Structures are given as structure tokens and as C-alpha cells.
Amino acid sequence: MIVFSGLVQMANAQDSVTVAVAPEYEEAGNVHRMFLGTNYRKVWATPVKMRVWRLNQEKGGLIIIKRGGGMQTKSLRLQDATGKEWVLRSIQKDPQRVLPENLRGTFAKDVLQDQISTSHPYAALTVPPLAAALGVLHAKPEIVYVQDDPALGEYRKDFAGQVFLFEEREPSGPNGSDNTGKVLKKVQESPKTTVNQRRVLRARLLDMVLGDWDRHEDQWHWQEEKGAQGTAFVPVPRDRDQVFTLTSGIVPKVASCKWLMPRFQGFHEEVRDINGFNFNARYFDRLFLHELNDQDWKAEIESVQAALTDQVIETAVRQMPAVIYALSGEEIMQKLLSRRNLLEQEALKYYRFLSKEVDVPASDKGEVLQVHYAQGGAVEVKLFKKAKDGSNGPVLYQRVFLPKVTQEVRLYGRGGKDEFLVTGNSPSPIKVRLIGGDGEDTYQVQSTGKAGQLLVYDRADEENVLPTGAVARLKTSKDSLVNHYNPRSFQYDRVMPLVSGGYNVDEGPFLGAGLLYTRHGFQKEPFAARHRLMVGHAVTTKALFARYTGDFTKAIGQYDLHVDVDAKAPTNASNFFGIGNETRFLKNEGSSIKDYRTRYDFVSAQVALNRSLGQHWRASAGLQGQFYSNKASEQTSRIMQQYNAVHPEEQVFSTKVYAGLVAGLTLDTRDNTWLPTKGLHWKTTFTGLRQLNNQQDALGLVASELSFYHSLGREARLTLANRIGGGTTVGDPAFFQLLYLGGNTNLRGFRNYRFAGEHMAYHNLELRLKLFDFSSYLLPGTFGLVGFNDMGRVWAEGESSKQWHHGYGGGFYLVPAQMFLIQAGVGMSVESTTPYVALGFRF
């Protein structure tokens, strides 16, 4: 609950007060403003004379119907003696409920509360003249002060003595209006019910001029207009809380970056990123603007620019109280003029963004959905109401899609017996998807265009009349999702920066940075493609590394594609202590780790197809290649030089190239992939490689590891994590292709890559104890302890060894705000003590 803290000066005990909405925002100092912005702090803190609002006297006396409000706003729904409804909505907001529960007691709550100062408390007063000029239905809000009145009853504590926005609840008239959900249902039920998309566009263009970024579906009501052809709904925008939102300061500017929350870019003379600005309307605009072409947009833009004259804009801004206009009016007016003048440039940019992929849904009645391939690659789409005699009735939808703008069109038949008709022989690069529905649908393809660009989706277990595979690609399935229409499936493609880091005794501190690019596509969940590129540097060894992974959902039929390129170059450094289970580390006999540190370049690349086999199993198969290069002139490792002298046939100082096959099988029943408390994870890989140059050696490798997790008690405070792993090689593996044991990977307390052999086995046991959850002012989180015991060994040809190596130790882990896990600890053995810091558990 927000406690009103403004100072009230009574101008007239019966009529008005002079009050500042929230003077506490102005108390921020210079450093505070540098990080969180100046925003509209002075506007919030300036006393304004306003009318006193009394429940029993307003509109002849009002009664409270119920309390309402969204995630940040509190409101009262009211009714007068005539039955007309009104609403009282808070200007001051409480953003606490927007935050995850574990962040509500932290600095994040205070930062979010402070950022309410980015909104203009009197902005809603400026909207009616602008909306009226455009013919956009609108409310007529008034800013009032709610007196401490016993008539408020149980709501007195939360509403008395504060500033509110008071307006009629149904500005569309006495017949009321429908919310967006109800309108969508009515449109789905009957082709005679439509939405006036030109009116929607006009209202949305006004949003862009106003900088009102929060225009999701719940911010709209709809007025019904009946005509000769049926019923059309026109939009009634509501809740103008984010008009003129102004962001400044370091933190908001970073937060509004394209890869984070670009909708918070703020109200300026130019729109930095119109597509990101409209993020909150991503579903709304695709639902209600899909039938309009560029000429429709240009006509509406021209109309809006002509109607919003300089005089109209000035009149609108001067609806603010005079003292507020003196603080911010001139600046806001100049921004409105600029945004009006740039509207065509920005709006058409957004039109092209919306038009890249377009969904065209029909209703649950039977319709005719017609596609015609026209000259120049254009695709004309028409929807007809099906007459009772089977002929085409009135045109319900018509639009021509051009390849320079549109990449994909999706036609959804939804319910009823629909007919899809495809004509025209002109090829087009536009992909057209015909998606049936619950009824028995008929598809007629009378086109000789590219069959690969025409796709048909429908149920395989229904009596549909399908085209042949020669004229269209058939995507049939018994799964109901194959022809399901999801109006909220669109997701923005996104590029995000990545960072990583850690520490171990061999590499020292190591840092990494990279990018994650996620692209979305039709019926591909959770993404169509994801690209991850990381580069890094180890401080102690001066080694460089880079890794690219690419995942492509349903790349070939139901098979996903995985690409993995791992490059340890051009200054890779890796430990090599020789081959065998009892190789010596003579650190106390005049040797240093540098004698065991070898430098060579190594690149591994893998391309594999994989798919799920039920809920928990996944199988993969593909190709793998390896590149190795080692120059004697760059080698400083004494052990590597000795190894080369003993094994000249291996040609250590040379370049080697390998290619072969790889396959894998995974079982995963874990409850959480990065903080598991129960379940198991079993992964097995099979690799076969042949050298393509020099000796043309061949080798095979099988590696498998099984991890299982069990927690004691309902709260899972103590988790037993157990892993058993191993592998074997056959053929002629080179030293860098052997199985390695040591380090944080599988044997803590020893150096990385401490033991190398043709065969390997290891066992890792960890006890993870969650000590407590904490909620500090900075961050909430989880803190716990880890204890571990590791055992393992390798086998090498010609060696007889019965020794098992043993490492043990412990540390702690921290999970800040449930975002990631960091652990630190120490591993010990008879040979060494090795500290480590890492992100995530090792298994």
C-alpha cells in the first residue's frame, strides 16, 4: 500500500485543496538522479489546486460496487442513481506486485517505486482533445482529491487523503462495451462479427504520438456498431498511465537497451526503436491490424497528421494545470509536434515489422479461404462467407501481400467445414501456410508455383480432402497442435550479451564474453534457432578459447539440428603429465607446472540431428571433425618433448585432421537442470574417427555417465548427488584424444588433466545442504554448503596399476535471486590442494 505523503493546504474547506501528489520523489539527490534519472520528480512534488471529491455528494451520490485495479493501481468502481458507472483510479502507483515475491523486500522494490516518477501524473488530462480530433472514443478524466470521508467505509484507509483520477467507466455510451476477450470470442463465433481495423490503427497511431507504450489487450474496451453486413466493433482505449513516460539516468537507459526492455525507451522527439517500443502490444496489433496494407496505413497516417494540428496539440497540453504546464508543457508540446511530423517514417517501419509474418484467422463457421499467386510474386488472400448453397458469399477479408515486405502468410480455418483454394501460376518467395481446424476441410491447389512454399497443416485422423505432395508440402499429424491457432504465439527475436568467469589453480582467473541470438518461428518451441558464441581468456596460461553452439528446432522434419564448434586456439595451454595411472608430478623436485604445460591448437566441430523419444529420452547422431596443430618451436613442455622422443610414430609436432561419426543417447528426469533435487541424468556418447592425413589412424570412443539425485525431507534441504562415469577407447588415439581424469571436471584435489589413459572410471559423491534463504536489501537468495568425495583412475596399455585416486573437500554455493548459481570451494588430495570458483554445479 502506498501511503500518501503530500502536504495539503486547504483553499476552501468545501470545494478544493492544494496538494502535491508525491513530493517524496523530489527528495532524490544528485547521485540518485544520475543513476535513476531526473524524470518528472518536480511535477510530482508541485502543489496543484484541485477539486475535493466526496462519495456522497459526487454525481448526486455514488455507491461503491467493488474494489478493482491492476498490478500497480488501486481503484473503486462506482455507480450513480441512474445506473451509470464511474471509476476512481490512483495516480500514485504501488509496483510491488509486479516484482517476483522474493524481490519485494529488496532494493528492487525501491528502485521500481522510484521509477514511477518517469510517468507524468497529469498526462491523462491531455488525451481527450487529441482523441476527439481523431474520432477516437475516449474518457474525460479529472484529477481530484479524495477527502477523508467515513462514507468510504472499509476503503477509507486505502483511499482517503489521496489524489485520484475520476472518469466515467463506459465513455462509449449507455449500451456499455465489451472487453477484448469477449470481442475475440464473438469474432471467432461468427463471420458477421468483425473489428474496424482502420479505427484500431488510428487509435494505435495516437498511442505512438503520445509515447503510450503499455497498450496490451486489457487496456482496451470495444463499442458495438451494427450495420447492414453485421456487427463491427470499434476500440475504446483506456488507462492512459504511461503517456509521456520520460526515462533518464544510467540504470533506465541500460534497461531500455534493445536486448533488455526497449519498451522503456521513453518519450522523446524521436522514437529510437519503434518495434521494441510496441512490445506490450505485440499480440494486440497482430490480432487487430492484419488486414490493412501499406496504403491503408499511409491514409490513416496522413489523416492523423492533418487532424493533430499545432493548435490541437497546444490546446491538449494546456489541459494540464497552469503550474504544471509551466514546468513541463512546452517540452512535451515540442516532442508531440516532432513525433507527429515523424509519424509516417516510424509507423511505416512498424508496418513492415508487423507484415513480415501475418496470421489471418477465419471464424468457427465454414468459410472459403482463397490464395492467388499474382504477377511479381504477390500473393492475394481473400476470405468469403460460405453461402448455404455452397457458393461464395460476401468478401470478409482481402489483402495483397508483396514479397518485398512479407515473408510468410498463415491462413487459419479454425472451426467449421472450410475450403482452401489456391490458384495462379506465378512463383512467389512468400511462404503460405494453410492451417485447417476442427472441421472437415477441403484443399484445392490449382497452382503450379513452388510446392515448397505452400504448406498444409491438418489432422491426420480427420476426413480432410488434402492435396497431393506434388503441389504442396503436407504437415499432417494426429496431434491437435498441428492446426491449433494461438494468437499469442509471436515472440521477438532477441540478441543478448553473455558473460562467464571462474577460477582454478591451473588457468587462474578466466573470463568469457559473448552473444546469444534467439530466433523464433512457426510451431517451433521454445525457439526456431538459437546461436551462442563465447570467447574467453585464461589469465595465468594466457590461453584463448572460443565456442559456438547452434540449435535449430525441427530443422529436418521432427529432427532438431545441433552444431557445436569448440576452438582452443591460437594460444591453447593444457596440462599433460604423460600416459598412465601413476604418472608423477615432480613439483617438489625442481620442476614446476610449466614443465607439464603443453601448447597446441585444437578445434572440434560436430553437426548432429537429434529428437525426443518420449518424455525423457533423447537420441542424436551426426558428423564430427577434429583439427590439431602442434609446433616444436612453440613447445616449452619438458614432458611433451620427452613423450615425443619416446613415441616418434605419433608425430606429436605436426598437423592432424580427423573426421567421423558421433551418436548419443540421453535420459533426463531431473526436476531442475541447474539445481536438481531429485531424478537422474544418464548420457552416453559413441564416437568413431579416422585421420585424413599422415598416418590415417582410426579410433573409437565410448563415454557414459549416470547422475542421480535424492533429497531427504519434504523441503529438500539435504540433497545427495551421485555420479558414476567412465569410458573406453579402441584403435589408435593420439595423446589429445585419450580419456583424462582430474580437476573440477571429475577429480577435485588434483590438477586439470592429471591422468590420461585409454580407459577411465570415476565416482563423484556430493552432499548439498541448503542452509537458508535470505532476503537482504540488495538481493534475496539461497545459501548452502557442499561436501564431496571423488575417486577415479585410468588404465593404460603396458601398465599394471591397482591404485585409485582419491580427492575430497567442500565449499559453499550461492543462488542470488534464483538467477544463477555460483560455488566456491577447495579440493584436497595427497598430491595438492586446489581452490576453485565456478558457475553452476559440475553435475
Image: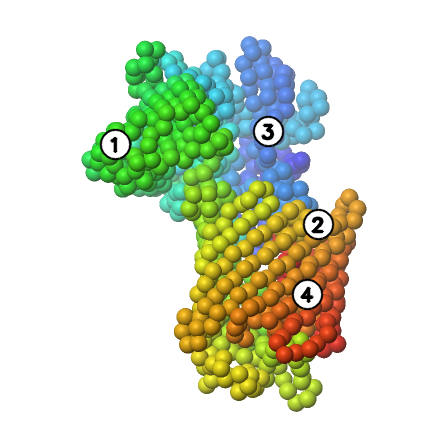
Image: 167 above or below 718 = above
Q: Which residue is mark 2?
A: 677
**Kind of residue sitting beneath label 3:** Gly
Estimate how packed mark 2 is, as few (under 14), some (14 to 19) or many (20 or more) residues with alpha carbons within 10 Å. many
Q: Nearer the viewer, mark 4 or mark 3?
A: 4
Q: Nearer the viewer, mark 3 or mark 2?
A: 2
Q: Are marks 3 and 1 in contact (CB under 8 Å)?
A: no
Residue at 62% in and 69% down: 759
Q: Nearer the viewer, mark 3 or mark 1?
A: 1
Q: Quadrant of the N terminus?
A: top right
Q: Are marks 2 and 1 in contact (CB under 8 Å)?
A: no
Task: Compare residues 269 and 200 and report the one nearer the observer.
Answer: 200
Whichever of labels 4 and 3 marks the residue nearer the N terminus, that label is 3
Q: Which mark is residue 762?
A: 4
Looking at the image, residue 443 sits to the left or right of residue 679; the answer is left
Number of marks: 4
Looking at the image, residue 669 sits to the left or right of residue 212; the answer is right
Measuring from the top left, give residue 639's x and y in whole percent.
Answer: 58, 84
Q: Quadrant of residue 65?
A: top right
Residue at 75% in and 58% down: 767
Q: Which residue is mark 3?
A: 69
Q: Residue furthest left?
A: 375
Q: Secondary structure at mark 4?
A: strand
Q: Which mark is residue 447?
A: 1
Q: Are marks 4 and 3 in contact (CB under 8 Å)?
A: no
